[in-house]
Image (cartoon, helix red, strand yellow):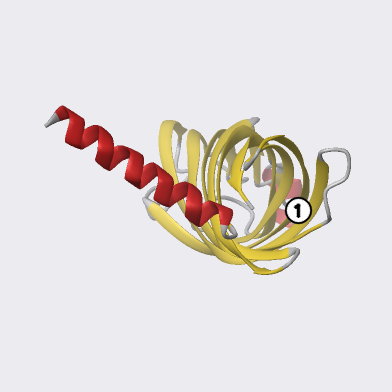
Amino acid sequence: MVQDVKVLCRILLFFCVAQLAQGQFLGIGGGGLFSPDLGDGTAAGRFFGSARSEFGNGRIFTLDAGTRVFPYVSSGLHYSFSSADMLLARGDVFGSSAEAELSAHTITFDTRVRTPSAYRFRFYGLAGVGFTRFGLEVKSEVEVPFPGGAPDKVTSFVITYGAGVERHLHQLVHLRLEVRDYQTYISKQLFQPGGAWHRVAVIGGITVGL
């Protein structure tokens, strides 16, 4: 029985490697997330204090999978999970505020354009679209930072773009360093003020395939 399992595992491993050698790739990575603070300069803010959201540096974990569509062009699916601490000030007369942890599950469909390899290095650019599912875990509140109650989950459309470099290690294995921007339109339901918001991720990882 044990011998049969070993043989099956070898067959599956051979099949996966064969598929990757034909132009597919898998990637895993992790790193840091950097988000600019958001502020509101409205008249209400000048009288009662600005509505704002301040973010601490976060963490991000990523998975990528895709296939080659042209010699130096590939398309695929990107998933990331990130979390960061957030301080929200509503900017009302009561001084309402909250401390929370903001988490985000993001799925995008990406297109990558790679350069040919030179001296074991190759560069690439990427762009994609998808959706982000935000979650908010409130740790403390002062007065009423969420008049309608703290939102549980909020889904937003996201555009992502970035660039990276890969270093060939052995056969189908590459080290990867990537900088990626997630641009999302944020509803005031989640935090103040609403509008376009950027999250910049610096990701290191390994790519197998291509």
Residue 119 lies, with reference to residue 74, above or below; the image says above
Which residue shows up at 33% across the image and 45% down it?
Answer: 11
Q: Residue type at mark 1: give it.
A: Gly
Would residue 153 appear left or right of 56 to someone viewing this image? left
Does the rendering let one see residue 187?
Answer: no
Q: Identify the residue at the far bottom of this view.
A: 70
Q: Nearer the viewer, residue 11 or 202?
A: 11
Residue 40 position within the rendered picture, expressed as x and y whole percent measured from the top left: 72, 52
Q: Nearer the viewer, residue 199 or 173?
A: 173
Residue 162 position within the rendered picture, expressed as x and y whole percent measured from the top left: 76, 53
Query: Label 1, on which residue?
Result: 162
Residue 190 position within the rendered picture, expressed as x and y whole percent measured from the top left: 50, 53
Residue 178 position within the rendered picture, expressed as x and y whole percent measured from the top left: 73, 42
Which residue shows up at 57% across the image and 53% down it?
Answer: 21
Q: Identify the residue at the far left of this view.
A: 1
Residue 146 lies, with reference to residue 167, above or below; the image says below
At label 1, counting other C-alpha atoms closer than 10 Å, the crowd grade (few under 14, some 14-19, many 20 or more) is some
Quadrant into which the N terminus falls: top left
Residue 62 lies in quadrant: top right
Which residue shows up at 45% across the image and 37% down it?
Answer: 143
